[in-house]
Each structure stands twice: as structure tokens, then as C-alpha cells.
Image: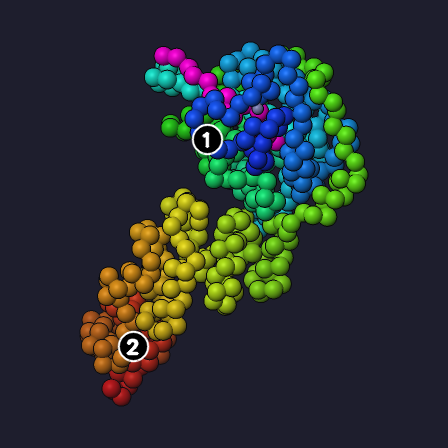
Amino acid sequence: MAEPKVIIGLETHVQLNTKSKLFCGCPTIGLEKPNTRVCDVCLGLPGTKPRLNKAVLEKAIAVALALNCKINKLVPWNRKSYFYPDMCKNYQITQYDMPLAYDGYLMLDFEGKKKKIRIRRIHIEEDPAKLIHVGGDITKAEYVLVDYNRSGVPLIEIVTEPDIESPQEARAYLSKLVSILEHLGVYDITNYVLKSDANVNITGTERTEVKNISGIKAVVKALSYEVTRHKNMLRRGVKPMRETRHYNPKTGLTHALRTKETEEDYGYIVDPDLSWISISSELIKQIKASLPELPDERAKRFVKDYGLNQEQANALINDKALADFYEECVKEYGEPVTIAKWIVTELLKSFNYHGITLRESNVKVSEFLELFKLMDEKIITARMAKELVKAYVDTSKSPKTLVAEQGLRRISKTEELLGVVKKVIKENAEAVKDYKSGQEKALHFLVGQVMKETKGQAEPNKVREIIKKKLLKQL
Ligand SMILES: [Zn+2]
């Protein structure tokens, strides 16, 4: 039987980084003391009149344009009714009947191929309050406290079509999405973790929705777990029900919450307190004209101006902080191709090994550049520099400090190397014989042995030259 096809759609909530909330003037960040950044409107007191914060609309339109969406010119607000203490009005203000934007796409470079992920819709809504479970998690808490500071903070929800075909592709989609949002300057990744609802099934099973997963790594884990669960159920002949599940980041497992409620259960109505948003072509044009350089354009520029290959450019622009880091290094040091090579191969390899990003590391431009200066000054070899990148990421000690602490230096003097060469020749008579009978490969091997003995501190070309001379009895 052919491997079943994996079908994934994501609904991702992003907090827009406006100064004030969606429908009132309360600050979105600031004092963390509970219930201090609130007013009549975001507490949902009767008789208060919400008023749209125009900055939210402008940022949301910028996102819609960057994701190639069409924009509705007249958009009503809806009330999504539910009874829960995180929503003091007993309804959430959202856009249901007609979203702000629809029918867009995000272009991915995934596993060497272009892949289009269609965007079904983008809408604006308010964030609910935060519940604090005291004395345990949601199942064991003695009581619950509510902090309304978050109530009314602007969110956009970005909904894809079910075009994603693996958890890894979901990771690529979310990384690119975050990079676009960061380039637009509408989202602050250090203040707000994006949250996704993931719809997943495989051919032959019913769709399940995993709710409210925080961050990108957790989405990948939750999806991997769900794909395996669906495959196992299919194999055993059990059809998964259509249901909503919860992801536990501590165990990496998902648990059934409830059979899926339908949208009708929320009793959407148009909000009579808010006027419909009217969006002029003029405003759209204006926002479009002021869009900053986006990741794909930046990649093109890296290829054109710095001479990088497309793969290197893609790897850099996928994380805005990394692309910024790269450009700062180039500004300081020059050598754009060399720097890109070292970041994309060595630095990213170390980050991936630890499962971190540049932001989560302690790597700094000035310290990273020490590597190149140490190589330029012929204090270390390229091979040593590779080891130093690993050690730098591991220990957060700068390359210069590591070199000083470990007494590392490049060995280049013939006299210093001759001893090791003699030892290697003595211990590898077979390889020496092969080389003398014309096998060049044997020379590689001998050079490799000397590199190993010197812990990479020797220059391979120099070593090769000494071995050759030694075997010709010129030394
Ligand atoms: Zn308020």
C-alpha cells in the first residue's frame, strides 16, 4: 500500500506590536502587575463603546499584502459568543463573516523545491485575558485567577489551506512566516510566542484539530505525534473521530479534549457597537508603497550584491536576526562569500545541534569575527576555526578567549612538524609503500594522520609538502 498522504492546515495567531490595544488606549506592554493595564472597554463593562485602533488595521493590511492576499473593502466585526472567565463580555470580537483578507499565498523553498502554501484568510480579533491556575495545572488547580492585562490586545489569525504535507514543511512555513512578520516590523518574537491550531489528517482518516500550540518547535512535535497516531489507527482499522485535542509540551503527546464543536455553536452575530471597517484603495496603495524589503527580495539582493548562491541566501533570510547578523559581519569585515559559508555551514550546524536560533545563543558579531582575524593572523587553521565555532556556541566563550585558554596555535614550522611526520611514516609503513608505488590516495591518508596527531593545528598543504620531501629523502 502506498504511504498515506499527510494533510495539514495551520491557523496561526500573531500578536501585533501596536502600542495600544485593539479597541482602547490601554498599553499592550508595560507594567506586569495583574489587572493594571485595563479600562472599561477592555474589561467589557456594559455601555462602553469600543473604537478601532487604526495602527492595528494598517499593520494587518501590511501582513495581508506581504502574503499576497486580496483585501475586502468593507469588513464587519462579529461577536463570537462563549462563556468563559477569560472573556469578560462573554463574547470575543473577531471577523467571521468576512475576513480582512483572503486568497493569498506564501512561497516556500522546501527541500530544494518551490512550494506554494495558500493562505485562506487573515482576520483581526482581540486576545482574551490570561488565566492563572493556582496550585497546579488546569486539571489540578485549587482556584483560578484572571489577569485582564492581555484582554483586548490585537491579534491576527492567519489561516492556510491544507497544503502542508509534513511536520517539517510546517516548520519551514512557520519560520518563513515569522521572518516575513519580523521584516515587516509588526511582530515582536521576544515578547509573544505565536500560537497555532493545527488541523491534521492522512488520507483515509478524519481531521483532528490540535489547539493552541505555543511556538514552532512544539507544532512540529505535536504534528509528528499526530501523524504517527493517525497512521497507527489506520493500520489497526480504527477510524479517528473528528475531534479537538490538546498538546502537552512536557510529554510531547496530544490528548482528546472534546469532539469538535461546530462554528454554529459560537452563535456569531454582527457586533452592533462597532461600525464596519471601510478600507480605501488609497490606503492599500499607501501601505503597499511603504512595505519594507521582505525576505525573498532580501535573498535576491544577497545573491546579486554579495555573490551568494540561492541556498545560502535562503538559509540566511529565514531568520531575520541571522540575516541582520550576516550583514553586520560583512559591514565590519567584508568577504561576504566567506562569511556566508561559515555562518550557513558551521554556525548553523552548531545551532541545529543544540536546537537553538541565533537569538537564543550568545553569539555576537565582534566575537564571531575574531575567528577570521585569528585565521588572517595565521594563529589558527581553518580546521581549528571549525572546532572553535562549536566550542564558542557550546561555552559562550569567545574564540580569542578559547585560543588563549587552551594555548591553541597553528603549527607551521617544518622543525615542529618533522617529528610528527617521522612518527606517522614509521607507524604506517603500508601506506608509505602504497604511495611509493604510485597511489596518491595513500598520501591523503598520511596527511590525515598528521592532522589527527596535531589536533588539526597543522596546515595540510605544509604537511603534504614535508611528507613528500621526507619520503624523497630531501629532509
Ligand atoms: Zn482598555
Query: Can residue 437 be seen here?
Result: no
Q: Which corner quadrant of the image does residue 461 belong to? A: bottom left
Choose between 443 and 292: the one closer to the eye: 292
Task: Residue under label 2, please give it.
Answer: 412
Choose between 210 and 139: the one closer to the eye: 139
Q: Secondary structure at mark 1?
A: loop
Q: Is residue 452 above or below residue 4?
A: below
Q: Residues within 10 Å of mark 1 (few under 14, many from 20)?
A: few
Query: Can residue 327 be seen here?
Result: yes
Q: Residues within 10 Å of mark 2 (few under 14, many from 20)?
A: some
Give how far across and how far down residue 119 sits, in percent: 66, 35
Locate residue 277 relative to residue 141 in the image: left or right: right
The residue type indicated by label 1 comes to: Leu
Task: Residue under label 1, please give it.
Answer: 31
The residue type indicated by label 2 comes to: Ser
Choose between 60 and 374: the one closer to the eye: 60
Q: Between label 1 and label 2, give the one nearer the viewer.
A: 1
Q: Is residue 290 magenta?
A: no
Label 1 and label 2: CA atoms lie apart by: 59 Å
Q: Which residues are magenta?
A: 142-157
